[in-house]
Image: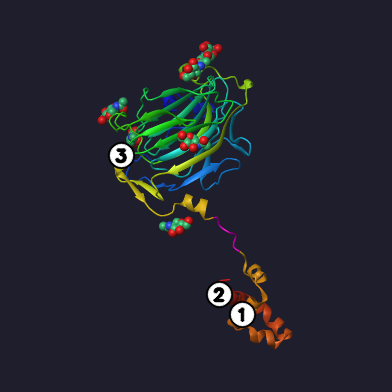
Amino acid sequence: MRYLSGLLAAAPLLGLVSAQVSTSCNPLNSTDCPSDPGFGTDYLFNFNTTPSYELWETTAGSVTYDSENGAGFTIKKQGDSPTIRTLFYFFFGRVELLLKVAPGVGIVSSAMWLSDDLDEVDWEFLGVNNTAASTNYFGKGLQDYHNAGVYTTRDNQADFLNYTTVWTKTGIDWYIDGQHVRNLTPDAANKTRNYPQTPMRLSLGIWAGGDPSLPEGTREWAGGNTSYDQGPFTMYVKSARITDYGGGSEYAYGDTSGSWESIKVTGGNSTAYKAIHEVQTPKLSISQKWNNLPAGARIGVYVAAGVVAAVLIGALLWYCIKQRRDGAREARLATEMEKMDL
Ligand SMILES: *[C@@H]1O[C@H](CO)[C@@H](O)[C@H](O)[C@H]1NC(C)=O
Ligand SMILES: *[C@@H]1O[C@H](CO)[C@@H](O)[C@H](O)[C@H]1NC(C)=O
Ligand SMILES: *[C@@H]1O[C@H](CO)[C@@H](O)[C@H](O)[C@H]1NC(C)=O
Ligand SMILES: *[C@@H]1O[C@H](CO)[C@@H](O)[C@H](O)[C@H]1NC(C)=O
Ligand SMILES: *[C@@H]1O[C@H](CO)[C@@H](O)[C@H](O)[C@H]1NC(C)=O
Ligand SMILES: *[C@@H]1O[C@H](CO)[C@@H](O)[C@H](O)[C@H]1NC(C)=O
C-alpha cells in the first residue's frame, strides 16, 4: 500500500479512499500517545457472521458476512473501498488468513498490518493476475520501493488460499498454503532500523488502484484502468486466525525510538480477551430469579429475610403494606439471595 501512498494525494477530493496509511498519534514524535489495547490471546475469527464490534471496526464502506464465503469486500462503483480493522494490537505474532482475491483490472485486494509509528507488513493481490501474491514491509513509515516480493500461486481468485505470516524478533516468514515463500531478518531490513517491530493492527480491505482519478503511474502499477461496469468485484476472507505473542493487555511506547525494546507490556487479560472468553450472561431481574427458585429455597429466603411473620399475619395486612414495602422487600430478598449464592 505504501507503494502508492505518495501518489494518492488527489484521491480524497473524489471520495476515493484507498487503505489509509496514517496514524493519529505517532510515538516517534510524541511521548503522550495513548497506549495500544493488546490482544494478548489467540483466536480464530470466522467471518460467517459479523464479528464483535468490541474487536473489529469498519473503517470504510460496508462489509457483508455469510456462512459460505465469510467476509465480502465489494467494489461496485467509484469510491468504494470497504475495509475492516482490528481494534486490538498484537506485538509479534501470527496471522493466518483464508482469502479469495477479487478479480478486476486495477482492483487491489489487501491485508495490511500497521503500527502507530507506521511499521507495516502486507499481502497484496492485483485482480489482473490470478496467480500472483505480493508481500511487502515498511519500517517507521520510511518509503522504500525495494521491499516487495512477488510469488506465484495457484488460481487465487477461484479458491481460498491460506496466507500466513509469522512475526518474531528474529524474522518475518510468509507462507502460501503451507509453503514458505519469504523470510526477512531484522538485519536485512536496514540493519533492524526498518524492521517492523512495534504493535500492529490488522486491516482487511479492497480498493481500485486503476480508478480513472488516480495518476497514470498508479493505474499502471495496479494493472490498468478500472471499468466499474465490469464489476462488482469482491474479495472474500473466510477466516482470520490471530495470535498475539506479546501476551499483553496493553502496549505502550516507552520512548520515541520505535524499537521493540522500548515497548512496555502490561499483563493481565485484555479487553479483547474478556470479550472473547467471558461471555456475559444476561443479568436476571430479582423477580425472575425469585420465580426460578425452588420452593424450599424461597422459604429459606423468607426466613432469613425475616418476612415469615408478614406471611403469617395474613392477606389483608400484607396487601396494605405491600405497596410501600415492595422496594425494601426486594432489596432485602436480593441481599439474602446473594448471601445464599442463588
Ligand atoms: C513529527 O511532527 C512534525 C511536526 O508536527 C511533523 O512535521 C513530522 O512529520 C512528524 N514526524 C512523524 C514521524 O510523524
Ligand atoms: C502473474 O504473476 C506471476 C508471478 O509474478 C508471473 O509469473 C506471471 O507471469 C504473471 N501472469 C501474467 C499473466 O502476467
Ligand atoms: C495455513 O498455513 C499455516 C502455515 O503453514 C499452517 O500452520 C496452518 O495449519 C494452515 N491452515 C490451514 C487451515 O490449512
Ligand atoms: C537506513 O537507516 C538509516 C539510519 O540508520 C537512515 O538514515 C536511512 O534513511 C535508512 N534507509 C532507508 C532506505 O530507509
Ligand atoms: C488508461 O486510460 C487512458 C485513457 O484511455 C490511457 O491513456 C491510459 O494508457 C490507460 N492506462 C492504463 C494503465 O491502461
Ligand atoms: C484471565 O481470565 C482467566 C479466565 O479466562 C482467569 O482464570 C485468569 O485468572 C484471568 N487473569 C487475570 C490476570 O485476571
Quadrant position of residue 197: top left
Query: Going by the image, does 324 lie left or right of 109?
Result: right
Residue 293: x percent and y percent? 65, 72
Marks 3 & 2, CB-CB < 8 Å contact: no
Q: Are marks 2 and 1 in contact (CB under 8 Å)?
A: yes
Label 3 Cα neighbours within 10 Å, binned few <14 / some 14-19 / many ≥20: some
Q: Residues within 10 Å of mark 2 (few under 14, many from 20)?
A: few
The one of 296 and 87 positioned closer to us in this rendering: 296
Q: Quadrant of residue 82?
A: top right
Label 1, label 3: how far apart the Cα atoms are: 62 Å
At which x and y percent is residue 213?
52, 21
Count every numbered label the image shows and give the total: 3
Residue 219, visible in the rendered structure: no
The kind of residue tagged 3 is Ser
Q: Would residue 282 be counted in the magenta stretch?
A: yes
Of the residues tagged 3 and 2, which is closer to the observer?
A: 2
- Amino acid identity at mark 1: Gly
Gap in angstroms between the C-alphas marked 2 and 1:
9 Å
Residue 336: where, in percent of width, then height? 57, 76
Q: Earlier in the sequence, mark 2 or mark 1?
A: 1
Residue 131 x, y percent position in the rendering:
52, 21
Q: Secondary structure at mark 1?
A: helix
Q: Which residues are magenta?
A: 279-283
Indicate the secondary structure of the residue bearing disc 2: loop
Question: In the rendered image, which residue does mark 1 sit on?
Answer: 300
Q: Give the mark nearest the N terminus, 1 or 3.
A: 3
Q: Which quadrant does the C terminus fall into? A: bottom right
Q: Which residue is mark 3?
A: 259
Residue at the disc numbered 2: 340
Q: What is the secondary structure assignment of the residue under circle 3?
A: loop
Q: Label 2 amino acid?
A: Met
